[in-house]
């Protein structure tokens, strides 16, 4: 098992990911587009915050099921608890030290198709894969 060291930009938030990352994802939902995220999906047990937990700030929107964490000092998105798989985190791959992004395939997911709370129709996009 590979241990990846991660940190935000200012170094206040530090974390480790014990997981062999075999795939990365991008997402076209409104928040992932704006934060320009490339993410690795890891089980919740694989992520350990080792410093700066008190500096994390939480952003929630829409269904509030996804929990988006940012460093309150430098503003960098570090990871989020996923909406479609709440027992997994999406990790900002650019926060991992020395991770070779070219070594794993990147898959584009379609989060823009997921239901919005204020959608004009009442359907729920349950069963939609991995997005945010
Ligand atoms: Zn920071």
Image (cartoon, grey):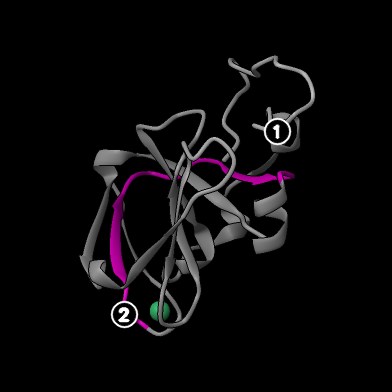
In the rendering, at what x and y percent does residue 59 appear?
48, 56
Q: Which mark is residue 12?
A: 2
Query: Depth check: 43 or 3 in front?
Result: 43
- Circle 1 residue: 118
Quadrant where the C terminus is found in the figure: top right
Going 50% across and 72% down the picture, which residue do you hit?
Answer: 76
Element at badge 1? loop
Nearest the viewer among 70 and 102 is 70
* Image position of 89 with respect to 124: above or below: below
Q: Residue furthest bottom?
A: 10
- Report crowding for label 2: few under 14, some 14 to 19, many 20 or more residues within 10 A (C-alpha): some
Where 90 falls versus 87 (above or below)?
A: below
- Check residue 1 in the rendering and tell me which mark sits there, or answer none: none
* Residue 29 x/y as whole percent: 71, 44
Separation of marks 2 and 1 at Cα, in angstroms: 36 Å
Res 71 → quadrant: bottom left
Relative to 123, is 98 above or below?
Answer: below
Q: Please state the horizontal and vertical placement of residue 27, each as a whole percent of the image.
A: 68, 44
Foreground mark, 2 or 1, reads: 1
> x%, y% of residue 92?
50, 58
Asked if ligand 1 lies within 8 A of label 2, the reply is yes
Residue farthest toward the left in the current orientation of the protein: 50
Does the CB distance between marks 2 and 1 fall below 8 Å? no
**Range shown magenta:** 11-29
132 vs 17, left or right, is: right
Q: Please tell me in which quadrant of the rendered image residue 14 appears.
A: bottom left
Q: Secondary structure at mark 2?
A: loop
Count of picture labels: 2
Locate the N terminus by quadrant: top left
């Amino acid at each position: 098992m590979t241990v990846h060291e991660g940190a935000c930009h200012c170094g206040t938030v530090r974390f480790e990911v014990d997981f062999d990352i075999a795939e990365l994802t991008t997402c076209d939902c409104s928040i992932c587009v704006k934060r320009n995220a490339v993410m690795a999906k890891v089980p919740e047990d694989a992520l350990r915050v080792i410093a700066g937990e008190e500096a994390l700030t939480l952003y929630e929107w829409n269904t509030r099921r996804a929990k988006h964490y940012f460093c309150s000092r430098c503003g960098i998105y570090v990871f989020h608890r996923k909406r479609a798989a709440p027992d997994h985190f999406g990790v900002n791959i650019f926060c991992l030290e020395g991770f070779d992004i070219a070594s794993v395939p990147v898959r584009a997911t379609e989060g823009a198709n997921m239901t919005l709370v204020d959608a004009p129709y009442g359907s729920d996009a349950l069963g939609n894969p991995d997005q945010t």
